[in-house]
Image: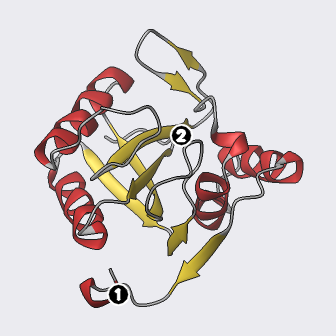
Amino acid sequence: MPSEERVYLSIGSNIHPRVKNIETALTQLKTWPAITVVAISNWYETEPWGKRDQANFYNVSVALTTTLTPAALLTVLHQIEQGLHRQRLVHWGPRTIDLDIIFWGARKLDTATLQVPHPHASERNFVLLPTAEIAADDPIVGPQVQTMLAANQDSSWIKKVGNVSEQND
């Protein structure tokens, strides 16, 4: 039986084909029997965060439940990234795909490989705004996101995009 706690991911891409990269990651997530995708936010085009001299990103947030442990889910996410040829060459640099665990219900995790809530979530419009869309009815994560949004000072732009397609990518 899946956990009642919702897990929230942020997924982004800024290397062509951005839309296909995210769609492929979402499809692969849905194929894992221990993962149930509960909600997907609208798509957003966003300014790069941290290292700004690169292409814009497309970002979505995903809510899911899972019977996996946090370490096992992180392994699945890394496998999806590797399958989409993610390379970690430059910190905050361009990427074909990026899948991050942002929230895991009320859990707080701090291991060598995983921090939850994500340590930079409160500083990033591209994480907070899409997550706020799909966490509004979550009594645990929804208030956390609203508190972070109220204190957020990220001035980078973010815009909701309508029908994403490779023609616009």
Specify the color scheme.
Answer: secondary structure
Total residue callouts: 2
Q: Is residue 43 above or below residue 32?
A: below
Whether residue 140 is visible: no
- Horizontally, is 130 left or right of 76 in the view? right
Which of the labelled discs sits on residue 168, or is there none?
Answer: 1
- Horizontally, is 118 left or right of 94 in the view? right
The CA distance from mark 1 to mark 2 is: 28 Å
* Amino acid type at image mark 2: Ile
Residue corresponding to mark 2 = 102
Tell which of 14 and 161 is nearer to you.
14
Which residue appears at 27% of the width and 47% of the height? 35
Q: Which quadrant of the figure has residue 118?
A: top right
Give the residue at the far right of this rendering.
150
Q: Secondary structure at mark 1?
A: helix
Tell which of 116 and 136 is nearer to you.
116
Which residue appears at 41% of the width and 56% of the height? 12
The N terminus lies in which quarter of the figure? top left
* Amino acid type at image mark 1: Asn
Q: Secondary structure at mark 2?
A: strand
Which residue appears at 27% of the width and 90% of the height? 167
Q: Which quadrant of the figure has residue 67?
A: top left
Q: Is residue 63 above or below residue 22?
A: above
The C terminus lies in which quarter of the figure? bottom left
